């Protein structure tokens, strides 16, 4: 186990982790730091367009792990729900253009929509876009989000809910993105990760700062918080996950720092705490 842990060959960094960098700067920075994997935030594609971004990524030699993010299916009007599904189809096409085999889904929610209704809208939206994803050869990963986001960001808040949705869909095209920041607190986490065997498409790491000062942009570097990251890693690997491990840190503090030095700190933390 120790030899496996002391290894960054499966390390991936999300471009939003180094938000101040453009896509071009992130590609150069990750290459300098010998980080082999990259997940691309859509905002980082926008200045270039998907085709040009795809060429840059292919030329870089970095492994494109996923595109983030799709989802946001619930809406109060039928037209808005239709628009969301069409937008997700366009996101799948973007993934093809940049060479991403996976789209991570933040499924959406609205304070005006009761959670059971929102979850049905998510299920219906996924069922509608699944054939397009299958035709494109792009997988879809439902990311359960911490319950503090259940009002506006996602009505899928536990691994149990995500597992149930995948069972209802019955498609090998749809799986789960396990982000330790969102699920570490769940007393049924080990069992639900085991239940997701074969359906875990992504694994995201960071740490939980205490006290948390911002619900969205105050994540911590691995090893500086209270999440038992290595234990959760063992569980997802026992459930069959052997892909890239993605460092996803949204942090107003770290975005103000020298991003090259920050990236080397992330590599050290990955080696020592992931």
Image (cartoon, rainbow, N blue to C red):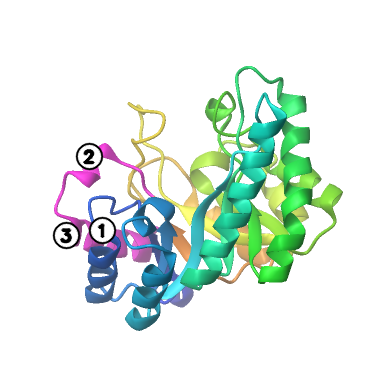
Q: Relative to 193, is 218 above or below?
A: above
Magenta includes 62? no
Q: CA distance from mark 1 to mark 2?
A: 18 Å
Q: Which mark is residue 253?
A: 2
**Based on the displayed image, in which of its 4 quarters is residue 217 positioned?**
top left
The spot of residue 238 in percent (x, y) is: 67, 65
Q: Which residue is mark 1?
A: 22
Disc 2 element:
helix
Disc 3 element:
helix
The spot of residue 173 in percent (x, y) is: 73, 63
Q: Which residue is mark 3?
A: 261
**Based on the displayed image, in which of its 4 quarters is residue 246 positioned?**
bottom left
Q: CA distance from mark 3 to mark 1?
A: 17 Å
- In this rendering, position of residue 238 left or right of residue 185: right
Q: Nearer the viewer, residue 7 or 89?
A: 89
Instruction: Give the residues in magenta.
Output: 249-273
Q: Relative to 170, is 73 above or below?
A: above
- In this rendering, position of residue 228 left or right of residue 111: left
Q: Relative to 266, is 85 above or below?
A: above
Disc 1 element:
loop
Sequence-wise, which precedes: disc 1 or disc 2?
1
The spot of residue 94 in percent (x, y) is: 51, 63
């Amino acid at each position: 186990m120790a030899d496996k842990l002391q290894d960054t060959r499966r390390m991936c960094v999300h471009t939003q982790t180094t938000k101040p960098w453009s896509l071009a700067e992130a590609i150069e920075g990750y290459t300098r730091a010998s980080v082999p994997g990259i997940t691309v935030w859509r905002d980082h594609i926008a200045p270039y367009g998907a085709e040009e971004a795809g060429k840059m990524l292919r030329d870089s030699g970095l492994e494109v792990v996923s595109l983030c993010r799709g989802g946001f299916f619930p809406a109060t009007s039928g037209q808005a729900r239709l628009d969301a599904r069409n937008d997700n189809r366009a996101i799948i096409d973007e993934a093809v253009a940049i060479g991403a085999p996976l789209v991570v889904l933040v499924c959406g929610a609205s304070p005006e929509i009761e959670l059971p209704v929102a979850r049905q809208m998510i299920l219906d939206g996924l069922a509608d876009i699944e054939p397009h994803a299958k035709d494109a050869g792009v997988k879809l990963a439902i990311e359960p989000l911490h319950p503090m986001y259940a009002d506006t960001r996602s009505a899928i808040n536990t691994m149990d809910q995500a597992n149930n949705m995948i069972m209802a869909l019955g498609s090998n095209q749809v799986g789960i993105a396990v982000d330790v920041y969102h699920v570490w607190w769940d007393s049924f986490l080990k069992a639900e990760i085991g239940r997701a065997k074969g359906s875990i498409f992504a694994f995201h790491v960071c740490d939980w700062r205490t006290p948390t000062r911002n619900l969205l942009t105050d994540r911590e570097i691995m090893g500086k918080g209270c999440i038992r990251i290595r234990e959760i890693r063992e569980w997802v690997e026992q459930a069959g996950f052997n892909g890239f491990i993605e460092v996803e840190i949204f942090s107003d503090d770290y975005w103000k720092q020298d991003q090259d030095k920050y990236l080397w700190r992330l590599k050290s933390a990955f080696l020592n705490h992931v």
